[in-house]
Amino acid sequence: MNEKKLIKLILQKGQIDEEVFLLSFALENSFLRNVFRILQEIDCTVYRHKNHFPMDIDFLIHQNLIDINNKKSVFTASTISELYSAKKAIMNKLKKFFQKERFDIIYDQYLELVVRIFIRDFVNEKIQYLNKKIA
């Protein structure tokens, strides 16, 4: 499996569930497992393994960014307008998350960039997916 197929699987399922999360570890030369680890911290809809230890305990609660109804997730958005709103929200959460140093400054910047690129690519794929569904 490659990253494109994994993104298509997320689109079909409408979320990053246990299967998708675990499949990310099987990808060679991929940073998706790291992307998913960061997304676990900032998006309530991303699967959390029972042994998941957060990088920042209750980050979303302390930053008042918790989304109780999961309305601001690019993974669960069902319309294009919801998708754009969710993209903006998750990018803001990502920016706030990396205001605090997590690993080291350079690696943090790299991870933030990789997550931003993944979100951008996922949103573009989801727009095409939703347009095909409508047509």
Image (spheres, grey):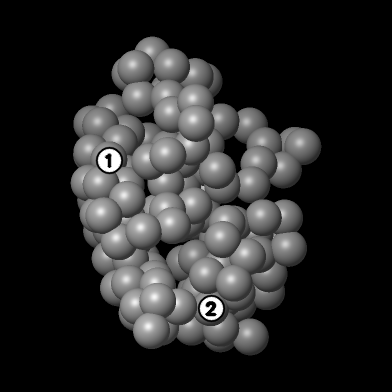
Residue at label 1?
89
Q: Residue furthest right?
A: 50
Between 106 and 33, which is closer to the camera in this rendering? 33
Q: Residue at x 72, y 43 (%)?
A: 49
Classify the position of the N terminus by image quarter.
bottom right
User: Of helix, strand and loop, which one carries label 1?
Assistant: helix
* 90 in relation to 77, above or below: above
Residue 125 position, x and y percent, is 37, 76
Which residue shows up at 52% across the image and 70% down it? 11
Whichever of callouts 1 and 2 sits on the residue coming sooner in the sequence is 2
Q: Quadrant of residue 61?
A: top left
| Image position of 71 (left or right of 40) | left
Outermost residue on the top side: it is: 62
Q: Residues within 10 Å of mark 1 (few under 14, many from 20)?
A: some
Determine whether, in the image, residue 104 is placed left or right of residue 21. Answer: left
Residue 2 image point, x, y percent: 56, 85
Residue 29 shown left or right of residue 118 in the figure? right
Disc ID at residue 8: 2
Residue appearing at x 66%, y 41% in the figure: 48
